[in-house]
Image: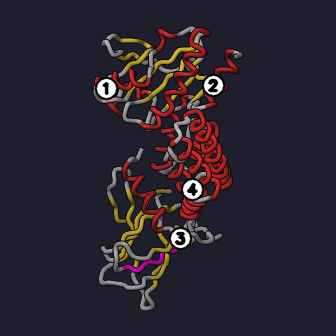
């Protein structure tokens, strides 16, 4: 994965892309693609196109001359769909996704934070569309109403109502994200869509894994020469072993007494593998719900295997006692570097998986009422 570089690249696109109608024209594959634009306040120097490597290195590819009318244009050979940068006079830099589209980039040119307009790129337009869609959702009357009711329930100490409202928001969020996913299907293989998908907090990979698998295969076929695209494919391949119906990988970590307890030791039961931590407020908010379900179904064959991402034993044990988490608890106290977190590709918590008696995954991130509904379906009460 590209990591910090892609995060910065995505942030730059969101800040500086302008929503416009994508050009229907694409570059001639024999002549390359056409880059053009206008500079409002040119300086001495050159306009240089650079390739952004996965390690963050910038490789100069081509140079453009500014005309007397402050415009520039030219055809460039793009080795593969990827991340590029237009450097205006060593003063203003604009990150780009280049693939097949002819792209127009208009800038001030004399200010690192100056005006930028990117036109003609379907990748950039898609990222802007996602940003606008999420912004509209967050500021919508429905979202504001949900937030207001949640605050009122929290102030009143109504935990069950808080859980219900939280699930209502998750359902609303899922409905908006499903529209974005449908748009990716229509867009087809695209680095713009891939940049959105890389943010797992934005598009839940577990809920949308069937689409991810399908999309990564299309990317594999259509963009094999793009290192960035193939990095995404590798990321999807790496988590296929956590798909529904797969056997959960073994975890073997110490409990608070220092004894190694294996996840497989709970076979024969339905097991909730719960990744959490004392410092994680959403985890602590969810704990009362897990406690309720554990007390209700433990005698029926329901167990919980808690994996803490805490850093100190004192914090870990304190939270166990405060939240009454009296089930199997393990941790290597390595925070995000936990062996189990790495095995399960954990990048945010709370995170949980529900396993059947054979250790196969039958549910993911079942929070609030969703966990109770699933357990009622299993145990019939």
Q: Is residue 351 visible?
A: yes
Mark 4 or mark 1, earlier in chain: 4
> Secondary structure beneath disc 1?
loop
Sequence-wise first label, 3 or 1 = 3
How far apart in space, not on screen, are marks 1 and 2 (Cα)? Answer: 29 Å
Pick whichever, 29 or 374, lies toward us. Answer: 374
Q: Is residue 103 above or below residue 316?
A: below
Q: Nearer the viewer, mark 3 or mark 1?
A: 1
Q: Is residue 94 found inside the magenta-colored segment of the image?
A: no
Q: Residues within 10 Å of mark 1 (few under 14, many from 20)?
A: many
Residue 108 lies in the magenta-colored region: yes
Residue underneath mark 4: 138
User: Helix or strand or loop: what does disc 2 sit on?
Assistant: helix
- Residue 323: give x, y in percent of width and height: 43, 25
Left or right side of 300 for 342: left
Element carrying mark 3: loop
Mark 4, secondary structure of its residue: helix
Q: Which residues are magenta?
A: 104-109
Q: Nearer the viewer, residue 301 or 325?
A: 325
Residue linked to disc 2? 372
Q: Quadrant of the C terminus?
A: top right
Disc 4 versus disc 3: nearer the observer: 4
Marks 3 and 2 sit apart, C-alpha to C-alpha, by: 45 Å
Circle 1 is placed at which residue position?
333
- Marks 3/1: CA–CA distance: 45 Å
Left or right of residue 7, residue 223 in this image: right
Q: Is residue 100 visible?
A: no
> Tag 2 or tag 4, which sits nearer the N-term?
4
| Quadrant in the rendering for residue 49 | bottom left
Q: CA distance from mark 4 to mark 2?
A: 28 Å
Are circles 3 and 1 on residues that touch, CB within 8 Å? no
Q: Is the residue marked by circle 3 packed among few (<14), some (14-19), or many (20+) residues within 10 Å?
A: some
């Amino acid at each position: 994965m590209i990591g910090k570089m892609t995060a910065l690249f995505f942030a730059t696109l969101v800040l500086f892309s302008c929503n416009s109608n994508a050009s229907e024209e694409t570059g001639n594959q024999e002549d390359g693609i056409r880059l053009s634009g206008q500079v409002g306040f040119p300086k001495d120097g050159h306009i240089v196109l650079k390739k952004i490597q996965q390690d963050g290195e910038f490789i100069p590819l081509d140079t453009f001359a500014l005309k007397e009318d402050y415009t520039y244009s030219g055809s460039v050979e793009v080795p593969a769909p990827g991340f590029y940068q237009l450097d205006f006079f060593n003063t203003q830099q604009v990150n780009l996704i280049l693939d097949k589209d002819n792209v127009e980039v208009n800038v001030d040119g004399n200010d690192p934070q100056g005006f930028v307009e990117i036109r003609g790129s379907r990748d950039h337009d898609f990222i802007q569309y996602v940003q606008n869609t999420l912004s509209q959702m967050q500021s919508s009357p429905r979202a504001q109403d949900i937030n207001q009711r949640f605050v009122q329930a929290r102030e009143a100490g109504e935990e069950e109502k808080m859980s219900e409202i939280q699930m209502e928001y998750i359902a609303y969020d899922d409905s908006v994200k499903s529209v974005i996913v449908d748009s990716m299907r229509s867009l087809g293989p695209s680095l713009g869509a891939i940049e959105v998908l890389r943010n797992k907090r934005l598009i839940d990979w577990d809920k949308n894994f069937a689409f991810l698998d399908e999309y990564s295969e299309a990317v594999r076929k259509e963009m094999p020469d793009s290192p960035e695209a193939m990095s995404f494919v590798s990321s999807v391949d790496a988590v296929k072993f956590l798909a529904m119906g797969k056997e959960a990988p073994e975890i073997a970590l110490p409990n608070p007494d220092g004894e190694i307890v294996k996840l497989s030791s709970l076979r024969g039961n339905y097991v909730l593998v719960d990744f959490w931590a004392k410092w994680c407020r959403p985890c602590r908010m969810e704990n009362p719900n897990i406690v309720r379900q554990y007390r209700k179904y433990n005698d029926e064959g329901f167990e919980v295997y808690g994996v803490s991402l805490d850093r100190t034993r004192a914090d870990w044990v304190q939270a166990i006692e405060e939240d009454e988490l009296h089930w199997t608890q393990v941790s290597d106290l390595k925070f995000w570097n936990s062996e189990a977190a790495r095995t399960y590709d954990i990048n945010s918590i709370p995170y949980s998986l529900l396993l059947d008696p054979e250790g196969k995954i039958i549910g993911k991130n079942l929070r609030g009422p969703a966990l109770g509904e699933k357990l009622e379906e299993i145990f019939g009460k």
